[in-house]
Image (cartoon, rainbow, N blue to C red):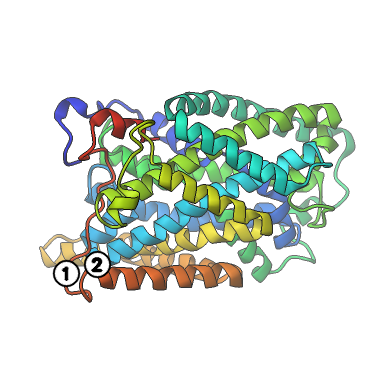
Amino acid sequence: MSGQTTSARLKGDLSLFSVILFGLAYISPGVVITMFGVIASTSGGAASTAFAVATVAMLLTGLSYAKMARAVPGSGSVYTYARKMLDSRIGFLSGWAMLLDYFFIPMVGWLITAIYFNAQFPDVPKWVWLIISVAITTGINVFGMKLADRVNKVLMLVAVGSLVLFATLCVVFLGRHGTSAPVGDAVWNSHTSVSAVTAAAAIAAYSFLGFDAVSTLGEEAEGGAKTVGRGIIGCVAAAGAIFIALSFVMQLVHPGGEFKDVDAAAYHLKVQVGGETYAEIINFVTIAGSIASCIALQASAARLMYVMGRDGVLPKPVFGKLSQKTGTPIIGLLLTAVAGVLAMKLDLTTATSFINFGAFLGFAVVNISVIAHLVRERKQGRHHNLFSYLVMPLAGTAVSVYLLTKLGDTALTIGAVWLVIGIVYLAFLTRGFRRPAPEMTFDDEAEEPAEETATATC
């Protein structure tokens, strides 16, 4: 990580277990409960199968991330891998697609928070709760990022505890009442089809977003790139196991894909297995955890825009400066807040599909980067296993592209427009593609004072 002194670097003392926990914390396994209604409805009542397909798809890409973590030691990302293995301009467009992810991820978080608020207080419209959620998290991020980080860590522990409690209550409920449909229907039934399951898997992939954050721990992990590679696979496998098991149990409690309110299905399931009092208490816990998640998501999106501005990828006078009073990237925070308000017109399915467009595109690029690495290595006389470095990345690319095509028309249209804007902007930055694209440095080197930059980091 250029620009950092040796004393500023963290010690490489994170164990494999710690690395996996880091990835799981970033993913937030409780998202499976929130997404259950959408996945069950889209798959025709086979949510666990959809999550299983998504897990296989993510494992293929996870293996490619692990290879790239070894090939490019240190902090990595889709942008870094594409820039080093393919081309600076492809790397730029990968970073541009990543920005689409980051920009809309807070919007989904706020929408989920508003859904839970509305389930708790149905007399208040969802759009009102959405605006309140956006205002709360934006205010905290503008004035208190360090406090937000501490709150996030505490609420993560609470969220894990509530997840275990919910799973236990589901099992107890099934022990007392059984299920109203054959157990096999939770995996495949007359309303299920390959098309429906893959469409649901394309949405379910949202639940895994964040596992690639493990690739940034190259310097902090004990054992370096080897531990990071194993951590990525372990994180995806652990998250997939949680998602498949819990969605299967939930599908037994509520067979089929019919819900009175798909977005609020999780709340009604909590009432079913634990009663109104439990549902209300846990709902408040979920709301608190959701707000904490939104704080982190918005901070990350704003920081990415700040880094891109600082490095000249976005207009520096607008994006590349921190507030002199608070040391935070206020422009980026306000832009994500404005985008969040757009969620008033969206449902959860459409909102998550925006995120997955950039994710699937990025996953495809990572897989292609592995193949490019193989070609480079062979030219230098170093040979790798063709199945591992060619066949599996090709499969990962094919799966990522296929899932991309299963997203809704709105997501594909917005994603395509976003890419066209990126290409036009890249042509401007590179004087008609004749120059290398500007490089983004995803660390805290900066022209600004060190304490300000650290404040802006989530």
As measured in the structure, the alpha-carbon distance from the residue carrying label 2 to the one carrying label 1 is: 8 Å
Tag 2: residue type?
Answer: Leu
Residue at the spot x=22%, y=74% of the render? 433
Instruction: Describe residue 98's horizontal placement relative to residue 320 as left or right.
Output: right
Quick one: 237 or 210, which is closer to the camera?
Answer: 210
Residue at the spot x=70%, y=55% of the render? 38
Tag 1: residue type?
Answer: Arg
Local secondary structure at mark 2: helix
> Where does the image place residue 140, in percent across and percent down from the top left?
51, 32
- Of the numbered discs in the image, which one, if any, rests on residue 455? none
- Is disc 2 in contact with disc 1, using a CB cutoff of under 8 Å? yes
- Earlier residue among tags 2 and 1: 2
Q: In the image as oriented, which residue stretches furthest toward the bottom?
A: 432
Is the C terminus in the top left, top right, bottom left or bottom right quadrant? top left
Local secondary structure at mark 1: loop
Residue at the spot x=61%, y=30% of the render? 159
Q: In the image as oriented, which residue stretches furthest toward the left?
A: 380
Residue at the spot x=85%, y=53% of the render? 260
Is the N terminus in the top left, top right, bottom left or bottom right quadrant? top left
Q: Decide if residue 33 is in sight here.
A: no
Quick one: 402 or 382, which is closer to the camera?
Answer: 402
Instruction: Describe residue 160's horizontal placement relative to residue 89 as left or right.
Output: right
Q: Decide if residue 309 is in sight here.
A: yes
Q: Check the image and report above or below for 54 versus 391.
A: above
> Where does the image place residue 157, in percent across and percent down from the top left?
56, 25
Mark 2 closeness class: few <14, some 14–19, many ≥20 residues within 10 Å: some
Q: Which residue is mark 1?
A: 435
- Of the numbered discs in the image, which one, if any, rests on residue 429? 2
